[in-house]
Amino acid sequence: GNSVTQMEGPVTLSEEAFLTINCTYTATGYPSLFWYVQYPGEGLQLLLKATKADDKGSNKGFEATYRKETTSFHLEKGSVQVSDSAVYFCALLFSGTYKYIFGTGTRLKVLA
Amino acid sequence: DTGVSQDPRHKITKRGQNVTFRCDPISEHNRLYWYRQTLGQGPEFLTYFQNEAQLEKSRLLSDRFSAERPKGSFSTLEIQRTEQGDSAMYLCASSSPPPGSGANVLTFGAGSRLTVL
């Protein structure tokens, strides 16, 4: 079946450190891929997305590239800030459908 | 627009009681979704409305669960005869149809946390 696997957290980094959160997927077909972020006390919100292979999504300094050959969509940021502390969810969605499949989420803690 | 609103934010109830959650989506969104999130897991799809029509229900939704969206605006999710296994965060999200073949991006509410004692 279709699924998303994320690295377990929490990930704890110092401010200005480099961030990578791994995400791999299993899918029959070619879904769109997403990163959603959930800040404390708030709803999930879209961080970035990519709809086809080799697309790079980017937002707020975060980037992720849709890699079909490795079925991955790893999230990266060159220099994290305390305000990036949140839970990050990788997800997939097939075109023309509405049912997301989410990973388990990765909690990021950034220390000043 | 204040985004997707959910009420209550936290409900504590005793096993066997009924609970109801309300979701107010973004006004121009005709699509509404309910997801459930348990500790350490990602959101799992429960049900989907397009306007007032409930188009899909997950197998996760037992007969004790019912969702409505009577006028195509707000939605309610009712759980009857609650069980301890129902303890979770219930998330509501809304969206409008994506342009062309674009991806369907959801706007989530902050969730309603249910604790069944």
Image: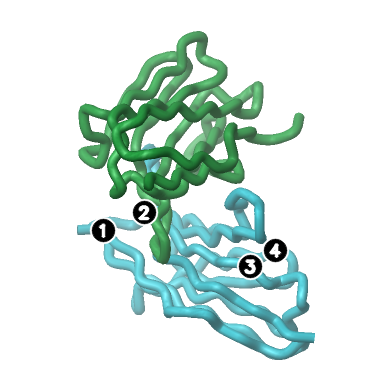
Chain colours: A cyan, B green
Q: Is residue B18 left or right of residue A40?
A: left
Q: Amino acid at mark 3?
A: Ala
Q: Position of residue A17 (x, y in %)?
A: 71, 90
Q: Which residue is mark 1?
A: A2
Foreground mark, 3 or 2?
A: 3
* Tag 1 near tag 2, CB within 8 Å: yes
Q: CA distance from mark 1 to mark 3?
A: 25 Å
Residue under circle 3? Answer: A86
Marks 1 and 2, the one that precedes in the sequence: 1
Sooner in the amino-acid sequence: mark 1 or mark 3: 1
| Earlier residue among tags 3 and 4 | 4
> On what subunit does the disc labeled 3 rest?
A
Provide the residue designation for mark 2.
Answer: A101
**Are both tags, 3 and 2, on one chain?**
yes
Residue that appears at 76% across and 29% down: B1
Tag 4's secondary structure? strand
Query: Is B71 situated above or below B36?
Result: above
Q: Position of residue B51 (x, y in %)?
A: 47, 17
**Pointer 3 or 2: first along the chain:** 3
Measure how far apart labels 1 and 2 are at the Cα level.
8 Å
The location of residue A25, given as percent across then percent down, is: 34, 68
On the image, which quarter does residue A97 sit in?
top left
Sequence-first disc among 4 and 2:
4
In the drawing, does residue A103 fall left or right of residue B83? right
Asked if the residue under mark 3 is in contact with the one under mark 1, i.e. CB atoms within 8 Å, the reply is: no
Pointer 4: residues within 10 angstroms few (<14), some, or many (20+)? few
